[in-house]
Amino acid sequence: MSLIELKDASFGYNQQDIFKGISFKIGKGEIFCIIGPNGCGKTTLLDTILGILKLRQGDVLINGSNIQKMRPHEIARQIAYIPQAHSKTFPYTVLDVVLMGRAAYTGIFSSPADEDVVIAEEALALVGLTRLKSRPYTQLSGGEGQLVMIARALAQKTPLLIMDEPTAHLDFKHELTVLETIVQLINDTNLSIIMATHFPNHAFYFENNNIKTSVALMDQKTFSQVGRPADIISEENLMMLYNINAKVVSCHIGSGAELKQIIPISTIS
Amino acid sequence: MYAVRKKTIYAILLLSPLVFIFLSLFIGRYHVPLPAIVEILWCKLTLGYCNLPDTYVSVVWDIRLPRAILGALVGGCLAISGASFQGLFRNPLVSSGILGVSSGAGFGAALAILIFSTTSYIYVFAFFFGGLAVLMSYMIGRVYNTTPAIMLVLGGVIVSSVFSALISFAKYVADPYDQLPAIVFWLMGSLASARFQDIAVAGIPMAVGIAGLLAIRWRINVLSMGDKEARSLGINTALSKGIVISCATLATAGAVCVSGIIGWVGLVIPHIGRMLVGNDNRVLIPASLSLGACFMLLVDNLGRVITGSEIPLGILTAIVGGPFFVYLLKKTKGGGW
């Protein structure tokens, strides 16, 4: 059985459709990358999967149950969310932030128990940030901050993570750290991930690391194509999606492995 | 180690307001010796007979004690609501009056003075209009069944300015010989008229508000992550926000209706708390309660003794609190801000 399934999902405000007729399913240990131009509705689609916005038509099923009929804490035990840019307000310690991942398991008038602290510390260890647990999270670098958000999501103990452009604003090293963490998590814990990204190369990266990867191109308010990265991320498709000239190249990265990358060349006027 | 430290902190938080209340019993123009105070407390609490001059008993038991208890409650309420609102609105510049409860209560009090020319209806009117102002801000801030922080703050600003204008209007039409001074003095804040019956009446909303905020304090951490993240972490944001706002309003309106408008406490005490115990609301909320109570007692005692006549509380909180806050800011170098 698939972990999550969207059936003919549509959403819009008033008369205007944001997206329509989107269907897909994901199994355990798979990663699903959604690629599309700015403003195509990726974030809105993620919000409906999270149950924050209600679909106009269609269903989101997680483990067979309909997300629209679930309460917030029930959803949060199935799906965790990692925001694109988290706006920091108060200088909470790293551990306090990760502990908030336990909200779905904590009553409205209670505080997290000792077991929750243990789970939060395990989540921090999984992303390799144990040494920073007492630091104010406002003082961390962008990459470390994103790892804290991943740890908070892991503390939710969900089978599915949703990431909205998790590597936006990160430098090369931090971007790779986040990607490596994602690969390691999928290998170790069999998580599934839905990820909106501006970088088609991320899909190649996951495929290269032997993770079952699918790519969806979001265009004209729906998924125009869905499939394996090698089939979907092509020069022709990027030309249609972004109106650009692009080139797919391939290079050897040692020990017989080969890495595919797509390089944007120029816009088409 | 951590558990021991936590227990010590909570013990200090609980004990310090009690110490301040006890010390307040000594302070004042009329001197009552220590043994007499202890004896009065003992015989009153054990419901025995006090073999002491009536003036001693009346000064300590009927005047200073209710005033000290009420002062502690008022200070604690203003500070705990301020801390909760700062977390809820994700903004450290917010205070307990952000949703208009103070202006609303001020108008209610002014209206009661205008209509009845006595002070007896002030409580009811101040409490009612304080609550009404918050309700109006909430309705204004509500869009599509959600209450974004910025809309709530704007609602509060609008409602506050309308009620401020109404207060000015009330002053304008008031009789300048008795009503106007009554309104002006009420707005400056005072605990001078505190009696046990005030604690019995206004203490109920204050106690309910405090209890609610203490219970929900960890949720405020999660709410301070913003609506979308809080929701994705599994929180019913509308319900949690509603409870925080209702409890903070009960506490503040209960405080304001007995004390008048006392600024500054609801803004600065939470910050002093942040510098001392950090930003985790699990500790910050009880710390604000305790610090607010101590600060209010300190200021009220000063106001009673510095000059021959009492200085209104609303004036002294800023004069005493301002320099103290600057000192703490410099000492902790902002404490992570």
Image (cartoon, coloured by chain):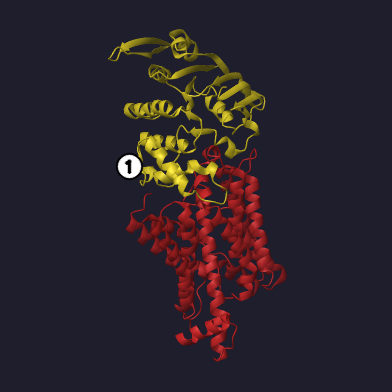
Chain colours: A yellow, B red
Which quadrant does the N terminus of chain B fall into?
bottom left
Whether residue A220 is visible to the viewer of this picture, yes or no, is: no
A263 or B48, nearer to the observer? B48
- The residue where tag 1 is placed is A131
A232 or B176, nearer to the observer? A232
Q: Is residue B281 left or right of residue A63?
A: left
Horizontal and vertical percent for residue B172? Answer: 64, 64
Horizontal and vertical percent for residue A17? Answer: 63, 22
Tell me: residue A110, above or below residue A259: below
The mark total stands at 1
Marked residue chain, label 1: A
Q: Is residue A153 left or right of residue A13?
A: left
Q: Residues within 10 Å of mark 1 (few under 14, many from 20)?
A: few
Whether residue B296 is visible to the viewer of this picture, yes or no, is: yes
Residue at the (65%, 33%) spot, across then down: A69
A195 or A265, nearer to the observer? A195
Residue at the (62%, 31%) spot, across then down: A67
Horizontal and vertical percent for residue A65? Answer: 63, 29
Examine the image and state in which quarter residue B128 appears: bottom right
Q: Amino acid at mark 1?
A: Arg
Tell me: residue A172, above or below residue A264: below
Residue at the extreme top = A236
Helix, strand or loop at disc 1? helix
Examine the image and state in which quarter residue B196 appears: bottom right
Q: Is residue B330 left or right of residue B132?
A: left
Horizontal and vertical percent for residue B266? Answer: 50, 59
B1 or A97, nearer to the observer? B1
Residue at the extreme right = B115
